[in-house]
Amino acid sequence: MDSISGKSISIRALTNEELQQQNQELKDQIAILTQQLDWLKRQLFGRTSEKLDHPDLFSDQQTEKPDSSGDAAAPEEGVQSTAGANPKSEKRTRCIRKNRLPENLPVRTEEIIPEIVQANPEAWRNCGFEEKTQLEKEPAYFYLRRILRMKFVPIENPFSPPVIEPAKPTLIEGGFWGPGLLAEILSNKYLYHLPFDRQQVLNKQRYGVDLSPNTMGDAAATIADQCGLLVGRMKQRMLEGGYVRADETFIRYLDKLIPGGSSNGYFWVYRGLSGDVIFDWQTSREHHHASDWLGTDYEGILQSDGYQAYENYCRVQRLRGKKVIRAACLAHIRRKFEKARAERPEVIDWILRIIARLYMLEKPLREYEADAEVRLRVRQNRSRPLILLLAKAFKRLIATRIRPKSGLGQALHYALGQWPAMQTFLEDGRVEIDNNDTENDIRPSAVGKKNWLFVGSPEAGKRSAVMYTLLISARNLGVDPQAYLQDVIERLPMTRPDELDALLPSNWAAANRAAHPAIKSERPHAA
């Protein structure tokens, strides 16, 4: 009996089973915390790249080493070999061969003659030179573009009204900045992560030209509003293609109407067959946003990670009688096992090696741009046995009573939940093995938000989505995004509705790829 309150307190000794259960729960919690700590250490101090090399898997496929004698030591055809050639000059040639420098890069030669020779050149004979080559750059420059619309009157009738070419319409009526400057400002922000205020400082300090950030923002808003027509047409064509890859990423946005003044918004990103990518801005991650964007008439394949919004959409579409198939992402499955590697390294390393084999099979298909039929045949013959092997291994591991809350348990449950959708890429050669391309499309916005931190308003989020859509699509299609945007800004006001398709990134790239090529970066593989 409690002497203070008068209430009885029952004290019960825990049974052995209850103690064992508590002990197991504490062990699970320690394992989870240890896994999280290992992951944080890898993020801070280790390698974050997802690319895996497993030379032991392919030890039987040794690359033949070139012979050190004979033709192997001969210089490349078309390259003159001279005794005593300057090694620095050869270094520049090697840079060009490796595509680090363009072959048509202008060369400016400077001859430095000693003063004693300049004083009496007739007394000296040139016996050679020592060469040093440097890569140099001159800053870009501003200029005023004066457009004079000349007026004319007939010589025979000088008092008649003058003839003058009508002024061309512009996206920004009465705007002072030209299309080239506007395209550079927008490319700097949305592709190269330079906020408007930093661009103001840069241009003021380097060129003495003061460009107002407010004017930059107003120009971006006007251009994005006008270019929304192109995005609508891109969406229509993407859905007609029957293969959409989806992902989403959050970003903070400012809004005075909500508590705290800011909240998380989301870019929902969709990628089509041609390389077009569309950003859709929403102020939440609610499931219905994916359904609203894809619509009730879409039929085809939807590739995504395990976020339930996409699976729910496919299920509802099938109930409506629409043929919608979901494809999973092997990179997301692999990441779950990578995070749990410290728990059972011998088991997880085996799983990662099998996944690496699947990526090795995909690598030549991508490099040689194999068509869907070839990809399907290779996957049916070589990838399918590995997929079946992984499924069998996952089921056996689950049967060994691995703790569900452990990292390995979570990875196994996630993989088995995704495995029916993971096999879609075996049945359709168009489908990629993962959704990494879409994640790469998101990267500019993910890096950009570290610089400009917030989207200024919900409306600014929608306009940012338009600019990301046009610029990243152009980059994916192999053309200079800035050159594309400049042409759109200049031509869109004069384009009739039935001619809009010519300004879509895919059509513009097909017509201008040779004149405005983009520098392509290698796609980072997950394994």
Image (cartoon, helix red, strand yellow):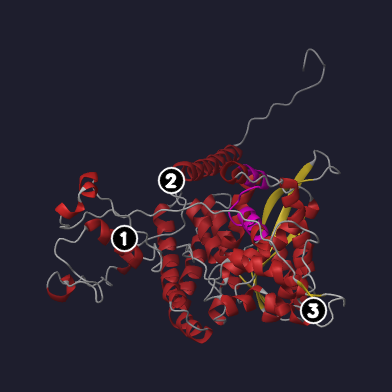
Image check: 116 left or right of 521?
left
The amino acid beneath tag 2 is Gly
Check whether the beta carbons of the residues at disc 3 and disc 1 lie within 8 A of each other.
no
| Of callouts 2 and 1, the N-terminal one | 2
Residue 489, above or below 300? above
Percent x, y for residue 412?
A: 54, 60
Say what amino acid the circle numbered 3 marks. Answer: Pro
- The answer to whether 121 is drawn above or below residue 383 in the figure is above
The one nearer the camera, 277 or 188, is 188
User: Which of marks 2 and 3 precedes in the sequence?
Assistant: 2
Query: Can see residue 271?
Result: yes
Between 384 and 169, the one nearer to me in the picture: 169
Residue occupying the point 20% across, 53% down: 121
Q: Nearer the viewer, mark 2 or mark 1?
A: 1
Q: Secondary structure at mark 2?
A: loop
- Quarter of the picture containing the N terminus is top right
Determine the residue positioned at 16% across, 76% down. 71
Q: Which mark is residue 46?
A: 2
Q: Is residue 199 left or right of residue 62?
A: right
Residue drawn 69% across and 26% down? 11
Label 3's element? helix
Q: How far apart are labels 3 and 2 at the CA level?
A: 53 Å
Residue 245, horizontal then vertical, whole percent: 63, 70
- Mark 3–mark 1 Cα distance, whole angstroms, equals 49 Å
Task: Please say whether residue 401 is visible from this viewpoint.
Answer: no
Start and end of the magenta stretch? 182-201
Which residue position holds label 3?
A: 497
Q: Which residue is mark 1?
A: 92
